[in-house]
Image (cartoon, rainbow, N blue to C red):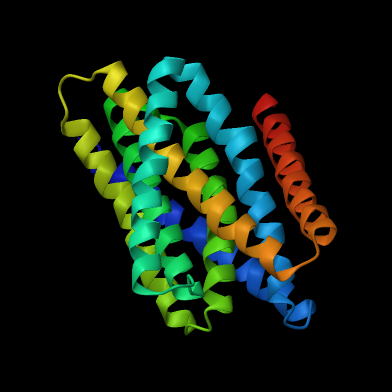
Amino acid sequence: MHIEMNILFTLGSLLGLLVGGGILKLVNHLARGRIQFMYAICGGILLGLLFFDILPSTWHLYDLRGVLLGIVVGYIIMLCIDLFLHKQNSEISPLQALILLTVAIFFHNVITGITFGITDMHQSASVFAATLLHQVPEGMAIMTVLSIAKIPNTFFLLIIALLSLSLGGSLFIGESVQVSSLKLQALSTGAAIGTLSFVIFHEIIGNTIKHFRKLHVWLLISLGFVIIYVYQYSLSLFHGH
């Protein structure tokens, strides 16, 4: 077992989420409270993260059919949760959107941690750096929804502590697994992508379309998308040296 690395990943995840939340608060302050605009940009950031980081690394590691099946399963699970919340209230509140986003990132962290633990990928310094930086946009997304829901910042600390512990704890679980099945990993990784995709398309982008003119929405989403493209390109130059 590599307890030190697990603790390091937990703290690294916490730091990345904190930095993301801090950046969002700073930008929101400079934008004089135009949090709905940040919500749309955040949708683009998560979309970029999905297309430029999560999906390419997944296609490289696993069988496409297993991943696609997992994505469908994960999306359906989140759809069922969403339908249950709609049954309780006719309109999804920002608080419920926060719950869905937290559940999606939690599930994604658990699957990522278990996969890293099984394959020993977390022993790599570059994987650690990529994981830490990967948490920054997620921290921004959580803080955005939290601000819209007008929930005290203390809850942000509780949420990111939970998410960081989910990553560190699942690394430990992954290391404990003696036999790994690539098919099972492909299915579970796909499910994690499906849950995150649901939140991005249905909750974040879907909600912004309701509040803005569609042209404004897509311009802001495109801005977030471009930010992540530049972000990922910069990381590739960093890893190239």
Answer with the quarter of the image where residue 183 lies.
top left
Left-right relation of 1 to 107: left
Q: Position of residue 210 (x, y in %)?
A: 67, 66
Q: Is residue 122 visible?
A: no
**Residue 105 or residue 217, whichever sits in front:** 217
Residue beneath the point at 58% across and 39% down: 50
Left-right relation of 141 to 196: right
Left-right relation of 63 to 204: left
Residue beneath the point at 16% across and 32% down: 176
Answer with the quarter of the image where residue 49 lies.
top right
Residue beneath the point at 81% across and 64% down: 213
Q: Is residue 38 above or below residue 147?
A: above
Q: Is residue 151 above or below residue 174?
A: below
**Residue 52 or residue 190, whichever sits in front:** 190
Left-right relation of 58 to 234: left
Quadrant that contains the C terminus? top right
Q: Position of residue 193 (x, y in %)?
A: 46, 38
Q: Is residue 236 above or below residue 151?
A: above
Q: Is residue 83 above or below residue 191?
A: below
Residue beneath the point at 53% across and 61% down: 139
